Image: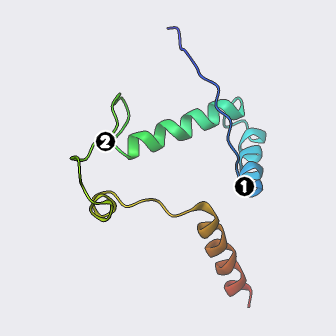
Amino acid sequence: MVRHLKLITFHVPEKMLEQIKVMLDLRLYPNRSELIRVALRDMLKREGMWGHTRTVEFPKGTPLDEIQHKRPFRRPLDEIDNEVEQHGKDRSE
């Protein structure tokens, strides 16, 4: 099977990159690219988008608040990182 792969470039938090390195050191994945492909595939499956070639479309004129209600946006990663750090500080006090 021939796979046509496209190159994408993106930024990740340093903590996430450290966790990726640990997984690679444990030889859970052969390389970063494969680890990220598996993670993206699993996310697409979880979101019900695996195998779909079209994007989700809302009727023309649908208000943004209605779209957000139907499919809430994910929280920003920085917000989650701050929450995790705060939780760690709370436990150590």
Q: Which mark is residue 50?
A: none
Count the marks: how many? 2
* Horizontal arrangement in the rendering, residue 56 relative to residue 35 (left or right): left
Which mark lies nearer to you, 2 or 1?
2
Residue farthest left in this picture: 59
Amino acid type of the residue that numbered disc 1 sits on in the rendered structure: Pro
Give 59 or 88, whichever is nearer the viewer: 59
Query: Left or right: 91 with respect to 40?
Result: right
Helix, strand or loop status at disc 2: loop
Q: In the image, what residue type sits under mark 2? A: Val
| x and y percentages locating residue 23 in the rendered image | 71, 44
Q: Which residue reaches farthest bottom? A: 93
Residue 56 tag number: 2
User: Which corner quadrant of the image does residue 89 belong to?
Assistant: bottom right
Q: Nearer the viewer, residue 19 or 2?
A: 2
Seen at 34% across and 61% down, the residue is 68
On the image, numbered disc 1 is attached to which residue?
Answer: 13
Q: Using the numbered discs, state the Cα–Cα distance from disc 2 to disc 1 in whole angstroms.
A: 29 Å
Packing grade of label 2 (10 A; few <14, some 14-19, many >=20) is: few
Question: Looking at the picture, does residue 66 appear above or below residue 23?
Answer: below
